Image (cartoon, rainbow, N blue to C red):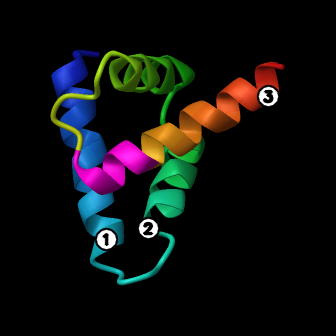
């Protein structure tokens, strides 16, 4: 899937969870990505963040960082 589409989707998910006004919106987004995104999509969005994360909203960026950190910890 094209990276720009993944960024757009991650931002839409982040926008939804940000409107819930909880302190853990980024964690909720990361959880959503783990549950509903294909592993290849998660790999691609994590790689995009590692390359700078252009276009990711602050909540989406934090969520992908959480996802990447968790994936890294599990691979250790």
Along the viewing direction, whichever of 15 and 49 lies nearer the viewer: 49
Percent x, y for residue 34? 58, 42
Specify which label sits upstream in the sequence, 1 or 3: 1
Along the viewing direction, whichever of 19 and 61 lies nearer the viewer: 61
The residue drawn where x is 18% and y is 39% is 8
Q: Quadrant of residue 53?
A: top left
The residue drawn where x is 36% and y is 84% is 21
From the viewer's perspective, tell me whether residue 24 is left or right of residue 1.
right
SS at badge 3: helix
Mark 2 lies on residue: 25
What stretch of residues is rendered in magenta? 57-62
From the viewer's perspective, tell me whether residue 36 is left or right of residue 69.
left
Can you name the residue that lies furthest to the front here? Answer: 52
Specify which label sits upstream in the sequence, 2 or 1: 1
SS at badge 1: helix
SS at badge 2: helix
């Amino acid at each position: 899937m094209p990276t720009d589409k993944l960024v757009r989707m991650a931002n839409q998910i982040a926008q939804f969870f940000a409107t819930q006004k909880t302190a853990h919106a980024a964690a909720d987004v990361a959880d959503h990505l783990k549950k509903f995104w294909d592993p290849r999509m998660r790999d691609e969005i994590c790689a995009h963040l590692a390359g700078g994360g252009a276009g990711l909203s602050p909540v989406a960026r934090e969520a992908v960082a959480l996802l990447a950190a968790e994936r890294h910890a599990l691979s250790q």
